[in-house]
Image (cartoon, grey):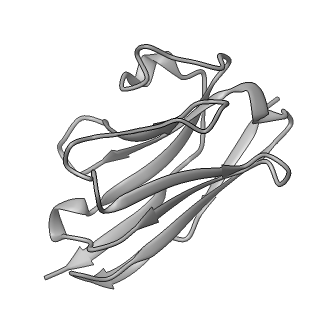
Amino acid sequence: QVHLVESGGGLVQAGGSLRLSCAASGRTFSSDTMGWFRQAPRKEREFVAAINWSGTANYADSVKGRFTISRDNAKNTLYLQMNSLKPEDTAVYYCAGANAPFLSNYGRPDAYIYWGRGTQVTVSS
């Protein structure tokens, strides 16, 4: 059974930075597409970033240029570096994995088959 655990969330002022981590166990995810999603109160879960097995990354327009997704396959860990944070980035952030090296529909939550429980990110103005 695959288990994902996110960490690194917290409270930060606008303009600040945070680095989220997602540790995977129960599966070697080097061949999987991995993604980050977020969900704010009373909103639907939305795509943030995804990275395929070769390291090619894709981003939501709202975070492009500010967030960077990366992976360390040796450590079975996914990262999300978040810079220049804004109050509208406040949400619970989830990591997710898909049993596919590439995904054309990487922005859709239903393309991913295993999920972490999330970590809260709060950005104050």
Identify the residue at horizontal 31%, vertical 72% (top origin): 122
Residue 53's spot in the image, x, y percent? 67, 30
- Horizontal side of 48 relative to 6 (left or right) equals left
Q: Assign the N terminus to one quadrant of the image.
A: top right
Residue 62's spot in the image, x, y percent? 19, 49
Residue 56's spot in the image, x, y percent? 53, 35
Q: Is residue 38 above or below residue 124?
A: above
Residue 30's spot in the image, x, y percent? 77, 34
- Horizontal side of 51 relative to 58 (left or right) equals right
Relative depth, front residue between 123 and 101? 101
Decide if residue 95 is in sight here.
Answer: yes
Q: Assign the C terminus to one quadrant of the image.
A: bottom left
| Total numbered badges shown on the rendered structure | 0
- Horizontal side of 111 relative to 46 (left or right) equals right
Identify the residue at horizontal 27%, vertical 53% (top origin): 63
**Quadrant in the picture for residue 66:** bottom left
**Quadrant in the picture for residue 16:** bottom left
Relative depth, front residue between 67 and 41? 67
Identify the residue at horizontal 59%, vertical 43% (top origin): 116
Relative depth, front residue between 55 and 26? 55
